[in-house]
Amino acid sequence: MRTTMNRLVRYKAFQKLTISYFLLILLTVSLLSSVLFYLFSRSAVKEIDRNSRAMLSQITYASDVVYNQVTTISDALLTQPEIISFLNDSKEDKTSNYHVFQQLSQFKSGYPYIYSIGIYRPSTKTTIDTAGLPFDSSLYAISAEKYMEFYPRGLIAPDRNQTPLQLLTFLLYPDFSFRTTDNPLIYINVEEQSILTTIRKISKADAANNVFVINNEGKVISHTDVNLFLEDLSDEKYVQHILDQDDAENSFTVNIHNKKHLITYVKSEEMDWYFVSVTPYSGLISNIDQLRNVTLLVTAGIVLAGLLISIFLTKNIYKPLSTLFEKIMPDTDSPIPTSPFIDEYKMMAEVFHSLEERERSMQFVINRSSLTLREHYLHSLLRSHPLDNSVPGELIQHIAEKVSGPYFCVLVFKIDQLKLTTGKGDADQQPLLRFALGNIAKEMLEHIGTCDYLITGENEAVVIMQYPKNELPEELKPALLNVQHFLNHYFKVTVSIGVGDVSFGRINVPSSYTSAQQYVKYRLIYGQESILDAQVIRPHMMTVLSYPSACEKKLIEAVQSGKPESIQVALEHFIEQISSGSINQVITYSIQLMLSLLKHFEYLQHVPDSNFNEYLDAINDIEVAENLTEIKDIFNRYCANIYMLIEEKNHWMNAQKHNIVIEKVQNYIQEHYAEPSLSLEMVSSIAGLSPSYLGKLFKNATQQSFSEYLNHVRLEQAKMLLASTQETAAKISESVGIYNISYFSTLFKKKYGLSPSAYREQVAMRSTDMRDNK
């Protein structure tokens, strides 16, 4: 018991189970008690309602009896000669009046419900009433619409001490069909108390039970509350509801003064009266409070017992959980410093979550290992390489069972112009494209047959298909077209596909792979986004093609002429000639053409800055080209480079020739600068060139014009003479070929910043200073 209480206090799961069971029992008991109490009270109310209807039916029977008595009396009175004579008599006769009074009294004595019978003769204003009541003139004022009228009224009698009589008066019109202002009137009074007495006897009504009678206008004819006689209740909602109903009897509930009441009514068959019972709901069952208290007490006892049952049930249900909890958490009984409560579910959930994560991680590793092993197996199958001996034979056998064929077809996917699509050096886009290609290919091809996707190169992927028959399915080509369309639409990438030959057994998968690789190479001829198989490339394999030497000759001539249009035409003719052959012939003949170009223009290797490594690059580009347009562009670039080298060689040779001429001109100037007649025209005649052309060559070679160079030589010689001799400036000027001393001085000062004489003084002073310093 102590262990149970300790778990109830500390263990949250035990608490939740106990509370759950207790709430379940509490809810069940409360619901059951409420339902039983409701059913009992509802049954009691129905019984009371049924009794009320029976009681009201009996009361209506009493009213029908009164109505029948009134009818009987009226019929009997109209058969009596004395009464007929009295009604028709127009003179007052006291003897006749007395006899009529006697007869009326006899009739009244035979009917206990009748309070009085009276006759009124308007012609003599004579009133005969068995109770001695005076004639109420309001009776005669009623506008009769039928033989008998009903009129409830209150009347003050002389002998009742001003206490009003509450009468239900029935008016009889003997001459209704010949009604005039002098027609006599017979009235029969029934005291309202007689109806009330009948109600009290039948219903045993008291202050808590409100029973009354209303007419079809909602006016009270009789009521257990005397003060409500002739009260108009038509404004009451429940009375309106009664008057609007067509049923002869019914019952319903309504709130009156914020309290629930049961309304029961029965309509009289003879009279147009409604007998109504209005009973508070709380008074329908006299011991309802006691019944409620007993029910609550019993419910509380059952709830307390339910608490003990909840603990007992929780203890039994909790045993498997506690056993599991103790195995998973062996130290759960040790005190937990952070909290006095122990949440078993949370702690076990953490443990299970940790185990689940570990299991998921292990499963992921196993799956990855299985996929990796399967990929290694398929790679080895493609290339006929045996798997590593470290791989267990059971795993290899398990994988081999799933790759059973019996017929296989290898599809080789080549991503066209991958480097142009993803950008050079983009290491992230290429794996993404290969991954997308694999997913799309598997999704599009799996409905045709089992397939495995492998990445075998930078721009190459392989799908190994398995078929039950030795033929390609008709759905294969449409599926491959869908793959190409999807990649082109969403990734802007084109893919060429080689469909290998169908092979039997796993041992022949490499041959299917080899054929697919060969077929997909023909995208060089058919261009991007091609689907290539044996049927497509068979014409190329059957074609016998010779090397187009004539095309080669035309191309060499076009290159030598340096005309791009001729080069383009010759290349297109060459490509057209080789495109009908096999892929090997296309590449071989392209390389052979490249070699012919190299040999023919071998002399260009001696041109400075020429780089014939471009030949090797062009050969590599041809071997990896993806279409004939690329090969044509390679030849275009190479031929353009050859033409540029030819131009450079010619320029270099001309430059060499020009340099010899310039050197001769310079030597001639150095030897003949002292001649005043030395000029460009003289030198050009000696060099065999025109003066203008020689002037351009000299300017390009020395960055100086002929006259500038000649003046430079003369001034340099004059400067040397000024420094080393004592000759005059004029004589020195003449000795260097300038006979105008002023012009000489101007040129000298412009070049050196000093006049000739100033320069000589400066040199002399510098020499003196040097001697002094020694």
Image (cartoon, rainbow, N blue to C red):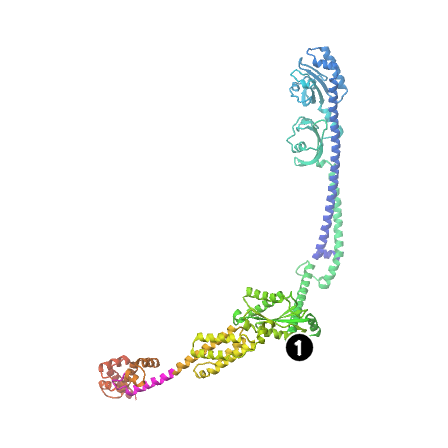
The C terminus lies in which quarter of the figure?
bottom left
Magenta part, dominant SS? helix
Front-most of 29 and 690?
A: 690
Q: Residue furthest right?
A: 110
Residue 390 lies, in percent from the top left, at: 68, 76
Q: Is residue 95 left or right of residue 681?
A: right
Q: Quadrant of residue 746?
A: bottom left
Q: Position of residue 726 (x, y in %)?
A: 23, 88
Q: Is residue 651 above or below residue 123?
A: below
Where residue 579 appears, x then y in whole percent?
53, 74
What amino acid does circle 1 point to? Pro
Between 728 and 597, the one lying in front of the other is 597
Whether residue 531 is visible: yes
Which stretch is magenta? 654-679
Q: Is residue 204 visible?
A: no
* Above/below status of 277 relative to 11: above
Residue that carries the numbered disc 1 in the rendered image: 386
Side of 307 relative to 501 (left or right): right
The percent coordinates of residue 450 (x first, y second) are 66, 68
SS of the residue at dot 1?
Answer: loop
* Residue 674 colored in magenta in the image: yes
Inspect the magenta stretch and tell me whether residue 301 lies in it.
no
Q: Quarter-wise, where is residue 470 in the image?
A: bottom right
Q: Nearer the viewer, residue 583 or 38?
A: 583
